[in-house]
Amino acid sequence: MSTLNSAAEQVAQRRGLMVFLALAVLTVIEYIVAVSLDSVPVLVALLAVAAGAKCWAITVYFMHVSKLWRGEEAH
Amino acid sequence: MAIILGFVLAVVGFTLGTGVLGGIRVSMGLEYWSTDLSWTIGYPFALLGWLAGVGGWKYWATEWFGGTAAQTPKGVKRYFEWNMDHKVIGVQYGVTFVALLLLSGLAAMGIRYELMQPGMQLFTQDQYNAVMSFHGIGMVAVAVAIMLGAFGNYVVPIMIGAHDMAFPRVNALSYWLVPPVAIMLVIAVIMGGWDTGWTAYPPLSVLNKSGQVLFNLAVITFGLVSILGGINFIVTIVYERAPGMTWGRLPIFVWGAFAGSLIAFFFTQGFAAGLIMILLDRVANTSFFHAAEGGSPILYEHVFWFYSHPAVYVMVLPAFGAVLEVLSHMSRKPLYAYKWVVGAMLGIVALSGVVWAHHMFTSGMEDYLHAPFLVLTEMISIPTGIIFLAAIGTIWAGRLWMRTPMLFALAFIFNFTVGGLTGIYLADVPTDIHLHDTYFVVAHFHYTIMGGEIFALFAALYYWFPKMTGREFNETLGKIHFWLMFIGFQLVFIPMFQVGVKGMNRRVADYPDAYADFNRFISISGFVLGSSFIFFTANMILSWVKGRRAAANPWHATTLEWQVSSPPPEHNFEGTPVIESGPYEYGVPGAPKHAHIGPASAEHA
Amino acid sequence: MAATATLPHGREVDSSHAARRVRINRLGLWLFLASDGALFALFAASRFYIAGTAISPHLNQLLGLGITSLLLLSSFTAYRAETAFTHGNTSHGRMMLLATVLMGLMFFGGVVYEWSIAEFSPSEAYGTAFFSMTGMHAFHVVTGVFFLLLMWARSGDGKFTGGTNAWPIAAAVIYWHFVDVVWVFFYPTLYLLK
């Protein structure tokens, strides 16, 4: 994206892209596991882990949950 | 006037919503009007119209669309429309819920008149169900919201040295959602009522009259009130404390409000979820509770009690706080075991979410759930016991000042003890199986909530009346109110334990002749109890209109709200609050004064 | 505005009035999301209570994967929008907001299409869970789109650009991520079990 302004913005945007790619990979894994696995307990456990990981990544990197206790950083 | 505009826009919204729905239905070849569905669709539009009309648009929402919000007016007018001052909102909540309390109390009088003798006299059985259900939900609404709504709103920000709540506009929004709740419940009764009590158990609540739909919509709205209020209190207490007001120096009422809010904001969704499922079953053809299709009525009981048991702690935690507040100031002694009380309150918050199924021992739920819920429920008596001991420790060897608020606070200790001890029989599975759905449960519940919270409410009401109105109340009328209410209360509910053990079912409009003597006695006692509220109402109206001007600090109390004028100035403090020690250092040698108002700093001037 | 304080470990924190206000609003928003999340969690739990882990064999799995990916991608563009606005890049931020709105609407369209072709009725146990959960989620998608559109419409003059000014954008975006988090759990719950 050529429209980006500052180095700081570029760093943040690149981090976002990495997180998105990780989420996408996890989603594909979820789908493959679901179509290929027959044992329901194992499936539930794996899906729970995958969903938990995705939820963690989104809350931490996309929603900036840590700003709740670390305050607003100065820019 | 704003309220009239609110009504007009509500009707417009309702007509619009039902009209669009009706148009779609007609074009699909159906009838224009379907009572359940039309109300469900029309109501949210009516609600938006109402909120816009009473001032939500003029003073807030217009900003979102690029407009400029108007300034709220001063004077008496502001009590009758959208206002964002927490003191105005506190008074609005207080008056609205006292009115609802008296209305629901009137319903109770009707119930007692009907039950005075066997057979049907005053009501038909349907009407009895409607009145009983209205009494239930009306009182639950009062109990959940009045402590936090009225006194939490009015007193908590001043106590912690804040200039207002964290979200003044959300605060106004949550108050203005209350009148639609009351109006919907009254319309529901006029439409023929609903017959599930306040608990709305399916399958009946999926199959009965359309009053049920209005009840559901009203209570979902009320859940929103509770959630928004809870969030507001949490954020206010976390971020709006004045410098020096550390967590360890918070007045205990603030802790009670904080703990109650934690429960309200998280668990209220349970009631909402259950009621939404009922609505979906009724209007969207789903099968949450249709056993034939794989649904389960037991699911409702789980979801419902997941909220509704914690809800009793939303009711009593702020009440505990208010009572301990009054006890300490009126005994001129430090609050006994402050830190343990705080720990106990937070312990109740933690435990409240894991005890719900003790309401379901006879419901047919899985047997293996009985033992854990029995044990967890009994564990709740540990933190409540700590709070009870702290109350006793506080008045122990104190110099008690027996004014009306103190009498109510002492009565709270007595009543809550009875309520707590009788609760053991209901938490234990073997006794509960006999006592379930009898008047024993009714008596236990009223001892904890009416004897506990409502007595605490009156302690708080008389205690803060001078601060909120700027007038002194009439002590004689206050004491008459207290003694009539206290004695009447005991005479109503002690016999109910007895008649419950003998097997009289609750919620039923009629009973076998064998219970006649008990019920005549209970009803007459009930009218004595009811008559106490005549003195209360007279006292409130007379004192507010022509009572003597109250001093800034009639109780010589230490907390911040008493260090400002009665009623407080518009932004609470003329200067900057300075907090130097804990709030209850009565007679502690060398302790600095808890708080005083310092000179105004440049920042807040 | 420019008031900053240095914490013991040397990180600079904006302690101005505006930053304090954002802190307060942020906690309020998160508490609201936690409360809303409890509602979704209760519906998800109810799904297991009445229907176990069974799913309908008539589900269109590819459509499910498609709309899930779309929502995830919209979360990414929402992140880009917020980052751009906080770093003073209004034009890119607005473009990304619009992209998010567009994908949100496509997701909603996907759900509507799925409802129209579903070969099971809401009166079955699984159908009850499916229609109520996707319906509630779709309602949140619509409100999220509304907030994002509002932000797009009002951000043109740059009043939401830079530091704490970008809070309204951040709030709408956090809400949008929340809607995605809900779907992160609803997607396997409704589509991927057996």
Image (cartoon, coloured by chain):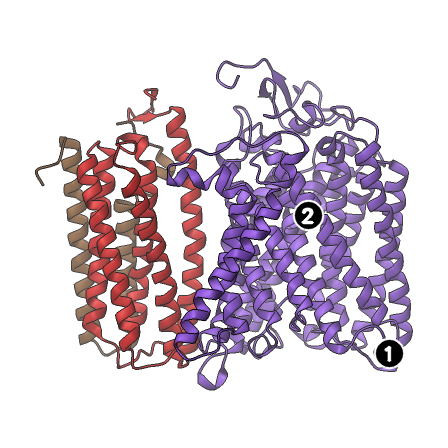
Chain colours: A brown, B purple, C red
Q: Amino acid at mark 1?
A: Pro
Image point 46% across, 70% down: which residue? B22
> Given the image, on which type of amino acid does mark 2 rest?
Thr
Q: Is the N terminus of chain B in the top left, top right, bottom left or bottom right quadrant?
A: top right
- Dot 2 falls on a residue whose secondary structure is helix
> In the rendered view, does B151 fall on the left or right side of B283?
right
Give left or right: position of C144 versus B175. left
- Whether A8 is drawn above or below B23: the answer is above
Please say whether residue B380 is visible from this viewpoint.
Answer: no
Q: From this viewpoint, which residue is outermost toward the bottom?
A: B292
Q: Residue furthest left?
A: A2
Identify the residue at horizontal 80%, vertical 26% (top origin).
B549
Evaluate whether residue B487 shows in this view: yes
Marked residue chain, label 2: B
Q: Position of residue B294 (x, y in %)?
A: 44, 82
The residue positioned 35% from the left and 62% from the top of the image is: C137
The answer to whether marks 1 and 2 mark residues whose Cβ atoms lie closer than 8 Å is no
| Mark whose residue sits in front, 1 or 2 | 2
Earlier sequence position, callout 1 versus callout 2:
2
Q: Nearer the viewer, residue B70 or C189?
A: B70
Q: Nearer the viewer, residue C183 or B385?
A: C183
Q: Give how far apart the Cα atoms at labels 1 and 2 are.
A: 35 Å
Return the residue at label 2. B96
- Residue B342 position, x and y percent, is 60, 41
**Pick the front one: B564 or C97:** C97
Disc 1 target residue? B118
Query: Could you say which is closer to the camera, residue B49 or residue C11?
Result: B49
Are the residues under badges 1 and 2 in a single subunit? yes
What number of labels is visible?
2
Placement of C182 over or under B294, stated as above or below: above
Q: State the residue at coordinates (29%, 42%).
A: C153
